[in-house]
Amino acid sequence: MTQATAQNVSDSGTSLVIEHLRKEYVRGKAVLKDISLTIDGCSTTAIIGPSGTGKSTLLRCINRLIEPTSGSIRLGGVDLCALRGKDLRAMRRRIGMVFQEFNLVERLTVMENVLCGRLGYISSLRAWMRKFPAEDINRAYDLLDMVGLADFAQARADELSGGQRQRVGIARAVMQQPEILLADEPTSSLDPKTSVEIMELLGEVATRNRIPVLVNIHDVTLGRRFADRIIGMSKGVVVFDGKPEDMANEHLKEIYGGEDWLK
């Protein structure tokens, strides 16, 4: 990334601005249709909607795991859709991602998985040798303490429960020192108690790191309880965008269709 581009990121803050975003997997059949949103502040935004409406596609377009068909996605004033190669890789470091299936390296320790969040900042040789600076190691310990896993630093990832794995995934994402954190269905495979704990932790991440957290979540109740803002999607478009307390049953019927599921 050029010095000027990096300066723009620093000067423009952490706002994510999406304008007229469209994604087609099959030509002429849009999964995302003209999405325009602004995400900023140290707050938690929940995206809700039925399966297949484009929630996960939206998050993956933001970090360019999926290539948008058209539109712009600006983080700190830089259009991610215009970046390629090393500039794109550098910009991705500023976007933390928490995955539904955790995406940990099972044979590595918890500490090594968290340190993977710094791989984009060290040389390939140091990454291969797993030689991280002392300040990175100290920060990793602090993050493990934050997520309640300080005593598991040397445990293998495949020895952990689902909730513990998701906590490692959150710590790894925060280890990147991102300007925004994306979480794709972070509670879908967890029990209700652990789901609440994970949503509480994501809210703490937003506040402590002063970054926006954008969560794709299937549980409307959890979204309403923990999010500062709800974005409701249906058939690839945004049909509700507001505070949880302002979302009425009429909005939910428009998002999900019909009334039977409300009973």
Image: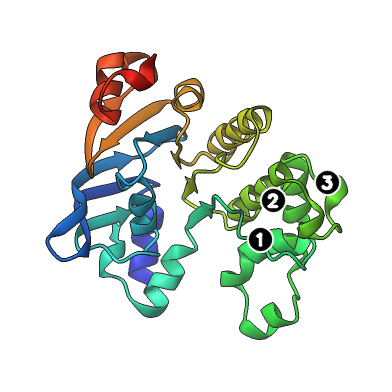
Disc 1: CA contacts within 10 A as few (<14), some (14-19) or many (>=20): many
Q: Amino acid at mark 3?
A: Ala
Question: Is residue 1 at all visible to an observer of this figure?
Answer: no
Q: Amino acid at mark 1?
A: Leu
Badge nearest the viewer, 1 or 3: 1
Q: Which residue is mark 3?
A: 150
Q: How many marks?
A: 3
Disc 2: CA contacts within 10 A as few (<14), some (14-19) or many (>=20): many
Q: Amino acid at mark 2?
A: Val
Residue 183 in the image: above or below residue 256: below
Question: Is residue 165 at all visible to an observer of this figure?
Answer: yes
Residue at the spot 82% in from the left edge and 55% down from the top edge: 159
First reached walking from the N terminus: tag 3 or tag 2: 3
Q: Which residue is mark 2?
A: 168
Question: What secondary structure is marked by label 3?
Answer: helix
Residue at the spot 77% in from the left edge and 68% down from the top edge: 107
Q: Which residue is mark 1?
A: 104
Badge nearest the viewer, 3 or 2: 2
Q: Is residue 133 left or right of residue 15?
A: right
Q: Is residue 235 left or right of residue 244?
A: left
* Residue 145 percent coordinates (x, y): 78, 43
Question: Camera-side residue: 22 or 263?
Answer: 263
| Image quarter of the C terminus | top left
